[in-house]
Amino acid sequence: MKIKSQERASISIAKILCISLILILISGIGVMAVSAKLNDVKIVLRNGYEMTVLTSKTKVSDILAENNIILGEDEKAVPGLDEEIIPGTAIEIKNKSEQEVQISQISETGVQTSMDDLLKNYAPITEKIIVEQIEIPFETITKEATGTGDQTRNQVIQKGVNGLKEITYKVKYQNDVEIEKIVLSEVVVKEPVNKIVQVQKVTSRSAVVDREIPAAVSGTVADYQAYARQRCYDYGWTDYDFNCLVKLWNRESGWRVNAANPSGAYGIPQALPASKMASAGPEYRTNYMTQINWGLGYISGRYGSPSSAWSHSQSRGWY
């Protein structure tokens, strides 16, 4: 009987020890739960969907990872991934701006550069409208008068005055540096006044007047005009412009390659002096293509189109 009493006492002590251990474990878990405080955090996804999660994490990246949320290359978290949140703060998933994506792509290539350099490359571009006035240089025209005697006299019968052209540009700047300049319009504010010099060649009545031997040329007027039409199209001009060109050069030279004027004007476009056409080719005295190329370039730079040149010729008698 004594032995049984001892066994019962041992079992009672073991039970007490087990219950004590269980109580200690429950207390520890309670302390851990109290120390790891759980917070409600709202996460707003890029598509606008909102979700509220319960977490003990405070770092944004940890909270997103805990909820299996992975950011795309064009997405960012606000606050940032390395930031700690405070109660009441929501985490928003947003779309990166185009500038941020481009900077990120450049950085991933491994190019050694600073953030300042990257931001300079993606600085905003500004546009300005700028109006400039430039002078149109006058030309010198000579007119020949006949007389008697043995000398040559030059007399200025009209002084030359430069004209004025107003050009409107659209200019783009980045970091205060001009990166693009586009002409929007050109307006002639004041037409130039050509200088006219009267050349009076006085010769004796018995003098023999030398005549220039016509240069050897090839092709026909139809060939010349067909080529001129195509070149007009190359400039972006219309059939109306070409028809004006035909009338203009009919008046000036009759579309003759070796048309020579006593003033010194020469060729289909009547360049004065003839040597001006050398800029278009050395064979300017005999090659109709060279003369037409030079003549159209002159019209484009001076008047903008053959129709404008023809209008000027009608009002002034020259172009």
Image: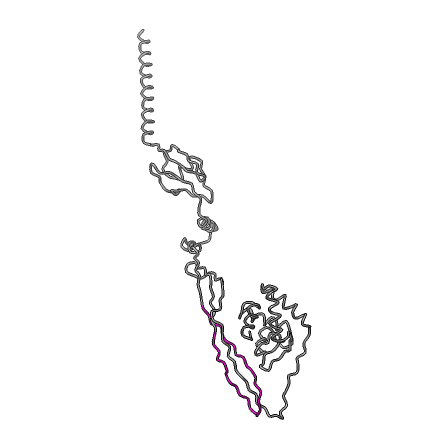
Q: In this view, does 100 lie above or below 9?
A: below
Asked which colour scheme the image uses, the reply is one colour
Which quadrant of the figure contains the C terminus? bottom right
> Looking at the picture, how far across and down is residue 22, in whole percent?
34, 21
| Above or below, comparing residue 200 to residue 274 in the picture | below
| Up/down of 23 relative to 198, above or below | above
Magenta segment includes 301 = no
* Quadrant of image for the N terminus: top left
Q: Which residue lies furthest to the top in this view?
A: 1
Residue with the most extreme front position = 315
Q: Position of residue 140 (x, y in %)?
A: 52, 79
Taking 247 as reference, is 163 left or right?
left
Q: Where is residue 174 in the image (x, y as percent from the top left)?
A: 43, 58
Give the vertical position of 194 relative to 69 (above or below). below
Q: Nearer the viewer, residue 319 or 8?
A: 319
Number of residue marks: 0
Which corner quadrant of the image does residue 36 belong to?
top left
Q: Position of residue 45 (x, y in %)?
A: 43, 38
Region rendered in magenta: 133-162
Dominant secondary-structure state across the stretch colored magenta: strand
Q: Toward which corner of the image does residue 285 lie, by quadrant?
A: bottom right
Which residue is farthest right? 219
Residue 192 vs residue 59: left or right? right
Q: In this view, does 219 lie to the left or right of 38?
A: right
Q: Where, by quadrant of the figure, is residue 232 drawn?
A: bottom right
Q: Which of 144 and 73 is in front in this view?
A: 144
Comparing 284 with 3, the one in front is 284
Q: Is residue 158 magenta?
A: yes
